[in-house]
Amino acid sequence: MVQSRDSHFDLIIRAGRIVCPDSGIDGPGRVALRGERIAAVEQSSTVNVDPATADRYFDFPDGVLLPGLIDVHAHPANSGSVFGVSPDEHIVPHGTTTVLSQGDAGASTIDHYIEDTISASRTKVLLAINLSRIGESEPRGCFEDLGDIDVDACVAAIDRFNEFIPAVAVNVSDRACGDTDPLEVMRRGIEVAEQTDLPMLFGMRRPEDWPLDQQLDLLRPGDVVTYCFRSRPHCIVQNGQVLRCVSDARSRGILFDVGHGTSSFCFDVARAAIDDGFLPDTISTDLQRLHIDQALRHDLPRVMSKLRAAGMPENQVFAAVTSRPSSFLKLDDSGVLRANAVADLTVLESSHSGQLGDNCVGTLWTSALAVRRGRVITT
């Protein structure tokens, strides 16, 4: 472990396995924190820790210590969103230290969202701003009224709050659009994205309304397609193989995200796509209010467990919730274990094997410890 001049630490976490996809670290070791930053990282199978060198010390001999998990599609909102859940109550305690809102706020509601959710939460919350000025503040679809799509207002909101907005949320589903022409929604979304140089977080339309290849052809490198493992109303797999238009989109630099949700994930589709060599770039929960009272807790470690059960290699699962979303969100000092990076950490442990939900059987990861900016979060 590389020591600074001051060899005393606020916190040391030792684990049977520490993993950092960005740097290639994978093995036993420990991470030491000072204040809100990582002070040192050491890989060693024989690490002896003197408790006197830290104010707090945790040892997880069977745990996996990762950079804090990053969820690029969920609904963190303390108020103002029909889908919103408290990030500090329902997200960070279960291992996710950074979360991207998928369109909970738009140009007319963003001031309240910044004040009541982003600034008020210890969880790091970012916003894929909704192309609709009303965001998800009403039960109706956010694009049902075309007048709610004000390009100039959306661009102005992004300019005002650019530090919190890494993407634009454009969902052209039937639920979001109603009778509004999805192509016009898409056209305006691209206009905002190009004026602000931001990627889109894109939800597809059912193919009988608008062929998938035509939708994907409009996307640009760096845009993200979410809900990629649905079975309906759209599906990227046919006869056990990923559609050619989807593979072509990936080859052009389009990214694909899980966006599990309440009905947006099919285990059989995920398994078929993975068997065909098509892995998601990012894994996300689409956590929302409807999940809170479910018998099985819905969190990012559970969704990760399902992807592992579907055949996704473990190292790829870890990258899809750390280094890859960090790159997409342009978080230079998150999603990585290295000295001076922000002290966001997650420890996962395997709790049991059995039903994970969605007719999926496997071993469940759960969060044993979460640390956000050096602060230990009880799990």
Image (tube, rainbow, N blue to C red):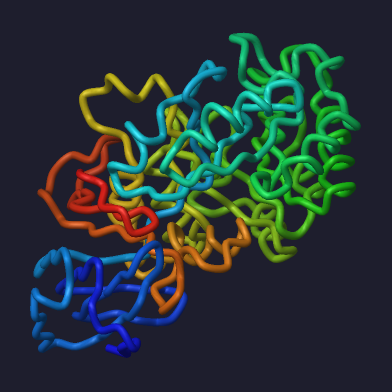
Q: Image quarter for residue 184?
A: top right
Q: Residue at x 75, y 60 (%)?
A: 221
Q: Is residue 224 above or below residue 61?
A: above
Image quadrant holding the C terminus, namely top left
The image quarter in which residue 202 lies: top right
Q: Residue furthest top?
A: 139
Quick one: which residue is furthest to the front in this view?
6
Q: Is residue 91 left or right of residue 347?
A: right
* Viewer-proximal residue among 56 and 29: 56
Picture mark count? 0
Front position in the image: 248 or 177: 177
Give the position of the N terminus as an image quadrant.
Answer: bottom left
**Quadrant of the image occupied by residue 141:** top right
Residue closer to the observer: 170 or 138? 138
Q: Residue at x 52, y 31 (%)?
A: 117
Is 112 or 46 nearer to us in this picture? 112
Q: Position of residue 73 (x, y in %)?
A: 52, 41
Decide if residue 246 is on the left or right side of residue 377: right
Q: Residue at x 54, y 61 (%)?
A: 326
> Which residue is depicted at the point 61% across and 39% down?
127
- Location of residue 95 in the rendering, given as x and y in whole percent from the top left corner: 31, 49
- Left-right relation of 12 to 308: left
| Residue 140 coordinates in the image, percent (x, y) | 64, 9
* Picture coordinates of residue 187, whole percent (x, y): 88, 35
Q: Is residue 243 above or below residue 62?
A: above
| Side of 12 where 144 appears, left or right | right
